[in-house]
Image: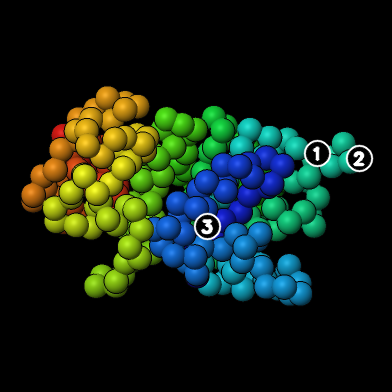
Amino acid sequence: MGIFLSYRRADSEMAVGRMYDRLIKHFSIDKVFRDLDSLPIGKPFPQALEEAVANAKVALIIIGSSWASITDANGEQRLGNPTDFVRLEVEKALAASLPVVPVLVNRATMPSAVDLPESLRPLVLHHGVEVRPDPDFHSDMERLIGKLSAILIEPNEPRHQGHADQVAGARSWNHANDPYCPACGGWRNPDSDSCSRCKRKIYSYPDLTCYQARCGHFMPPVFAYCTVCGEKNIQA
């Protein structure tokens, strides 16, 4: 297992569901831990949490607009409860000294340290990313996947052939075989050379690689970032 997902269902369940689908398509299901799909039946949550964090290479802390402020039935901040599962997840990840990435969804902003329990305040010092709703969701996820790949994939390790691999891993990208625009993620007519959503033309270049050859993977010019290493593409 490589990616540990921490989130609160009442805060970001829909966004996390979409993110999870993209991540397992790229990295495979056994590389991503999400409680709903990854908890073994009958295993106590604290034990499963310990094992998941111990086996993780990176933790994604998914933060929606109510992540820090959501309350329990008594009106108390849920993160203020030392036994709150989300709080325990973040504490375990911070203590494990692995990369901890705050991921802002649903137009959320980073919580202020004063709004968090003392044990969680180091989280606000970690560099985060934003995954916006459509039409930016797919391009934001491509950028996130690229940065995660740099952490998770060892040199010469075979990569799971998900959508991003089909585009980024091939030396020549045949756009006629892919019904989704690599710029915005929208569906397009495979017989057309432009996206029906963002109207950008989709080209096929035989040997275009990551700018400055940082990782050498193929990157269509419509991508703002390399889908493997995250390097900015000045041609986009």
Q: Which of pointers 3 and 1 lies earlier in the amino acid sequence?
A: 3
Residue named by callout 2? 74
Q: In this view of the protein, which residue sits in the foreground, 220 or 211?
A: 220
Indicate the amino acid at tag 2. Asn
Residue named by callout 3? 59
Question: SS for tag 3?
Answer: strand
State how far apart marks 2 and 1 are (Cα): 8 Å
Q: Where is residue 77 in the image (x, y as percent from the top left)?
A: 80, 40
Query: Residue 57: which numbered mark, if any?
Result: none
Q: Is residue 93 visible?
A: no
Q: Where is residue 52 in the image (x, y as percent from the top left)?
A: 59, 69
Q: Position of residue 6 (x, y in %)?
A: 61, 54
Residue name at image x 14 percent, y 43 percent: 204
Relative to residue 130, is residue 6 drawn left or right?
A: right
State how far apart marks 3 and 1 are (Cα): 24 Å
State how far apart marks 2 and 3 are (Cα): 30 Å
Relative to 225, residue 147 above or below: below
> Residue lying furthest front in this view?
191
Q: Where is residue 31 in the image (x, y as percent from the top left)?
A: 47, 67
Relative to residue 155, is residue 58 drawn left or right?
A: right
> Residue lying furthest right in this view?
74
Indicate the amino acid at tag 3. Ala
- The quarter of the picture where residue 13 lies is top right
Relative to residue 26, is residue 102 drawn left or right?
A: right
Residue named by callout 1? 71
Residue name at image x 73 percent, y 67 percent: 45
Question: SS for tag 1?
Answer: loop
Marks 1 and 2: in contact by CB < 8 Å?
Answer: yes
Marks 3 and 2: in contact by CB < 8 Å?
Answer: no
